[in-house]
Image (cartoon, rainbow, N blue to C red):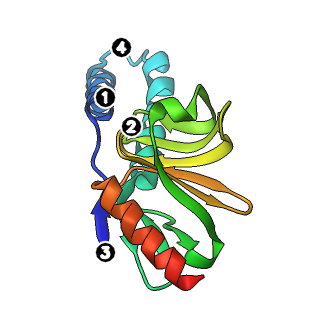
Amino acid sequence: MRYAATLDGNSKIMTNLTIIITLIILCRQITDVNHEAVKTSILLIVLIPAIVVAACLSPRYYKITAEGLVIQRALFPITILFDDIVRLRSITEEELGTSSRMLGIGGIFGYLGTYRSAEIGKYQRWCTNRENLVLIESHSRKWVISPSAAEDFVKTMNGIINVAK
């Protein structure tokens, strides 16, 4: 089964604004006749790779396979085996409490990377929106994802996990 990973309104705005601003800076850089655009060169050296990395690491969809769950990304898909999953449930943004990014991106192509929450501790967040959140816990790690139709996803996954155990 395959579940979409759709961007929420905030992520769409942040992503589009970042791309537009980067394109404006790039146009300014190209049309600079004085060749004194050191600041914009440095900004572009930071922005362009950050946008590319965020796009490549953002989930495209979540797929339930025979072995487990695959968080499909353009680069480095993540596979979580059914045998490793201890608990899986729907959660809300409020249940996460205050989260801080340890190494991640918040808003551009989603909410990606390693976060720390006062409520659940350290976790990997591979979400494209802040609705439909699902917490997956194993013995050693926690993941938060945001598949479309989260309730159906949780029912399907829990049915498979319970049969597997």
Residue 137, position as x, y percentages in the image: 62, 58
Q: Is residue 99 above or below residue 7?
A: above
Q: Which class describes the residues within 10 Å of circle 3: few (<14), some (14-19), or many (20+)?
A: few
Residue under the point 31% across and 62% down: 152
The residue to which callout 4 is attached is 34
Q: Are marks 4 and 3 in contact (CB under 8 Å)?
A: no
The residue to which callout 3 is attached is 1
Q: Type of residue at label 1?
A: Asn
Q: Type of residue at label 4?
A: Asn
Residue under the point 37% across and 45% down: 128
**Alpha-carbon distance for marks 4 and 3?**
56 Å
Q: Which label number is shown at residue 130?
A: 2
- Comparing 129 with 96, the one in front is 96
Residue 10 figure quarter: top left
Q: Considering only order in the chain, which callout, 2 or 3, is on the residue closer to the N terminus?
A: 3
Q: Nearer the viewer, mark 2 or mark 4?
A: 2
The residue to which callout 1 is attached is 10
